[in-house]
Image (cartoon, helix red, strand yellow):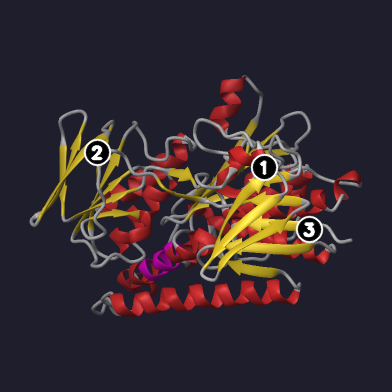
Amino acid sequence: MAVRFVIVGGGPAGNSAATHAARLGAEVTLIERDVIGGAAHLWDCIPSKAMIATGGAMSFARRSELFGLQDETPPALDTAALKARLADIEGHLHDSVVQLLESQSVRMINGVGRLKGPHEVVVETQDGIEELEADAVLLSTGSRPRIPDWCEPDGQRVLTTRQAYPPPEIPEHLVVIGSGVTGVEFVHMFSSFGSKVTLIVSRQQVLPTKDPEVAAALEDDFLRRGVVLFKGARAVGIQNDDDGIVVDCDDGRCASGSHALLAIGAVPNSEGLGLEAAGVEVSESGHVPINHHCQSNVGHIYAAGDLSGKLPLSSVGAMQGRKIAEHVMGLHTRDHRHLDYDKAASAIFTEPEIADVGLAEADAFAMGRKIRVTKVPFAASAKALINSDPRGFVKILSDPATGVVLGGSIVGRHAAELISVIALAVTAGLKVGDIVDSLLVHPTLSEALADAAE
């Protein structure tokens, strides 16, 4: 009899687990309350990057004279066309995922799933209640924006991130609260659209968890664009009236604007999942703690994606789903590489882009670990000059004794694509010499990777 595998949540983790387990012979049922693809396709990753691409096109038009073109009037944003573009992208991706799941004979149920017991899943649909028996269960219900008690988003002037793809109107002056990855991407996005932007930075640098040199490069770009930074200020209240909004900070400063955007993290969707009924432990933050196989304390019940409390990246969720499928089907007893979260590549789609992977320079120094750090600016790259965009650099960290690549950071055009080379080196334990000896195309930005590995 085939393994009965029930998945609650059809985001990157859920649909990756579903397709892979089905290929391996499981009988898979996927439950999703909204649209297959999850928050990454509906409200987060994909629509935000599509809007950033539109802003990038507008920025390129403003810099057209750098390419020997006449400086004509730059294009204006067509909000209706942008909305249609987002809907088209989301629809295409949704259809692609559904077709893949159907091709693997995955049963999809549109409804709300919850655990009734360790091996029972109840699904509430428009047609009624259905109970499913499961040999294994994956919970991948994602997260939602965190809303503090001092703020009441109205979807008009005070927005959560999910109310801004796009907002009802393009803000004249947007106050962004939160300077993490999501916050800085919105700063970049709306400043590209022509909005004035003020960023509330609770600490002394944007991207507080990133390399200070990387953060400084982004801050410099923001300041050149006219972005106002409120450093060392924590938002504590929002005044909202017909004239606009005022964000009150704990140091007495106030930031005025036409709109405010909350980008201060997310909370897991763990309520109503029946975790207690199945004996699944939950942390104080609402996450489901997991081991290296993504198992909860109940061995056949797994958690992945934002619910698991690990890196909140679509790529990580998808890889968790794949590893879970292999574990459910017993493949972990063969050659099996556990998911190493410390080697996950991540990117920030600002301008310039930012990407990193592996060991960070500041963390290495904090641990007292000896490292070799090499850095090459894109200003020395022929391709960067051809692109009229010499901003940024490539930085590679390696073991001084063995030459093994430990990590790296890239700031500059196409950093999210270029970081894959360093990510492969980190994951596979390659040496800097392996990158140096690669015969790369000229002229390309990737040449800077070999230069930095010298």
Magenta highlight: main SS: helix
List x then y, in percent, for residue 5: 75, 57
Q: Which numbered disc, 2 or 3, marks the residue closer to the eye? A: 3
Dot label at residue 4: 3
Measured Cα–Cα span from mark 2 to mark 3: 45 Å
Task: Please identify the residue farthest to the left as the structure is shown.
Answer: 243
Residue behind mark 2: 150
Disc 3, SS:
strand
Dot label at residue 26: none
Disc 2, SS:
loop
List x then y, in percent, for residue 314: 58, 55
Amino acid type shown at disc 2: Trp
Disc 3 residue crowd, few under 14, some 14–19, many 20+, Cα 10 Å: some
What span is colored magenta in the figure?
A: 48-55
Task: Please identify the residue farthest to the top as the structure is shown.
Answer: 368
Q: Which numbered disc, 1 or 3, marks the residue closer to the eye? A: 3
